[in-house]
């Protein structure tokens, strides 16, 4: 029997729990000749800002022992050009949901981007990137301070006309606390984890390998920590949790779902294999069939915890 691969969160139904993560899938349409977009559940656009951004100078991506470091600098075409030039073409794939990643350096910028997107067709949800430095708070990331996070989520919730996911930074003392702040401030779901702040040094040149000095660590190296954080967040809130961090196989996706994730995002794997998301969606369906799982949604939070 073919397993039911549909999942739901925040009022959105996906044909598969596999989502292409922000920053690894462009604006979606660039992958249409590589990936069958109708075979994955959704994709998240690269971060969209109010105005176009050039990003950091190269080098801005380097390979690590079990993943990669990146400091792209949130390069993007800006919200106006995204709506005009990228979004219309995505209507060819109605079964693949479009989630727009939104960022800004002030609360006002976040709100302005969302207000522009509210009037555009073909978007299912927003994902707020709260790892951006808040210039009004001395550069501290919104997601690293409870007060800044609460204010941002509440303010954007007041203007957002679509479901709002908040993408949490792992660079905090308690991911559960940050998830609770999002829930109480009006978020419809949280996604975690974003990249870990890290760096790498060229010992011969005695210089950092990234022009930006530090960057975000992603890939298989972070997966065990990400799974733990998804588990903690899912136990702390009643809103859905979307898990990501180092997923490369169907078993990885199952692990996140057993920890409490309603869906999963696949990112760094797409650099090694541009068809990773489609492959994982297919492999996850095969895994469910071979393990007699009739509904993939039944895996969510189904881990058996040993009694102490």
Image (cartoon, rainbow, N blue to C red):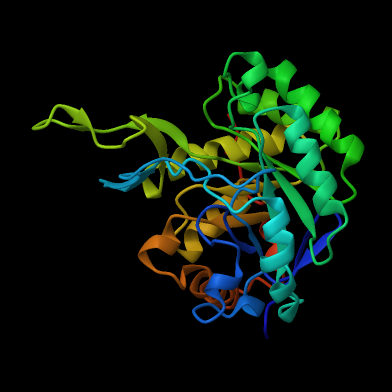
The residue nearer to you, when weighing 154 against 182, is 154
Q: Is residue 66 left or right of residue 268?
A: left
> Residue 152, relative to residue 75: is it above or below?
above
Q: Position of residue 96 (x, y in %)?
A: 70, 72
> Going 52% across and 47% down the picture, which residue do you hit?
75
Q: Quadrant of the N terminus?
A: bottom right
Q: Is residue 22 left or right of residue 62?
A: right
Please report the residue visible at 49 percent of the width from the left and 55 percent of the height from the top.
Answer: 267
Furthest toward the bottom, the residue is 1
Q: Residue furthest left?
A: 204
Residue at (62% x, 53% y) in the render = 257
Asked if residue 272 shows in the view, the reply is yes
The answer to whether residue 229 is left or right of residue 147 is left
Q: Residue 160 is drawn in which quadrant?
A: top right
Q: Is residue 91 above or below residue 259?
A: below
Q: Residue 19: x percent and y percent?
A: 62, 61
- In the image: residue 292, left or right of residue 219: right
Q: Nearer the viewer, residue 49 or 171?
A: 49
Q: How many marks?
A: 0
Looking at the picture, how far across and down is residue 239, in whole percent? 80, 42
Residue 301 appears in the picture as rendered:
no
Between 32 and 173, the one lying in front of the other is 32
Q: Residue at x 73, y 34 (%)?
A: 109
Q: Quadrant of the C terminus?
A: top right
Q: Position of residue 138 (x, y in %)?
A: 59, 13
**Position above or below: 165 against 289:** above
Give the residue at the far top of this rendering.
138
């Amino acid at each position: 029997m073919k397993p039911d691969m549909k999942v739901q969160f925040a009022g959105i139904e996906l044909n598969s729990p596999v989502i292409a993560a922000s920053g690894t899938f462009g604006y979606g349409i660039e992958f249409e000749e590589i990936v069958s977009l109708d075979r994955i559940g959704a994709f998240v656009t690269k971060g969209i800002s109010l105005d176009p951004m050039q990003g950091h100078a190269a080098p801005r991506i380097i390979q690590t022992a079990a993943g990669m470091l990146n400091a792209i600098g949130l390069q993007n075409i800006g919200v106006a050009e995204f709506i005009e030039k990228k979004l219309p073409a995505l209507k060819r794939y109605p079964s693949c949901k479009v989630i727009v990643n939104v960022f800004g350096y002030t609360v006002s910028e976040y709100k302005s981007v969302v207000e522009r997107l509210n009037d555009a067709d073909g978007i299912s949800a927003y994902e707020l990137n709260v790892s951006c430095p808040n210039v009004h708070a001395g550069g501290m990331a919104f997601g690293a301070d409870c007060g800044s996070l609460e204010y941002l989520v509440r303010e954007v919730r007041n203007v957002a006309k679509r479901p709002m996911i908040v993408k949490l930074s792992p660079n905090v003392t308690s991911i559960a606390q940050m998830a609770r702040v999002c829930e109480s401030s009006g978020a419809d779901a949280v996604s975690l984890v974003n990249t870990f702040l890290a760096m790498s040094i060229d010992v011969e040149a005695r210089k950092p390998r990234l022009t930006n000095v530090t960057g975000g660590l992603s890939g298989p190296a972070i997966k065990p920590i990400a799974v733990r954080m998804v588990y903690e967040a899912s136990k702390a809130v009643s809103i859905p949790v979307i898990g990501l961090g180092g997923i490369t196989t169907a078993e990885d996706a199952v692990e996140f779902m057993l920890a409490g994730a309603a869906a999963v995002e696949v990112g760094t794997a797409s650099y090694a294999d541009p068809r990773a998301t489609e492959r994982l969606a297919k492999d996850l369906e095969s895994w469910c069939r071979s393990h007699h799982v009739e509904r993939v949604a039944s895996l969510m939070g189904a881990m058996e915890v040993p009694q102490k």
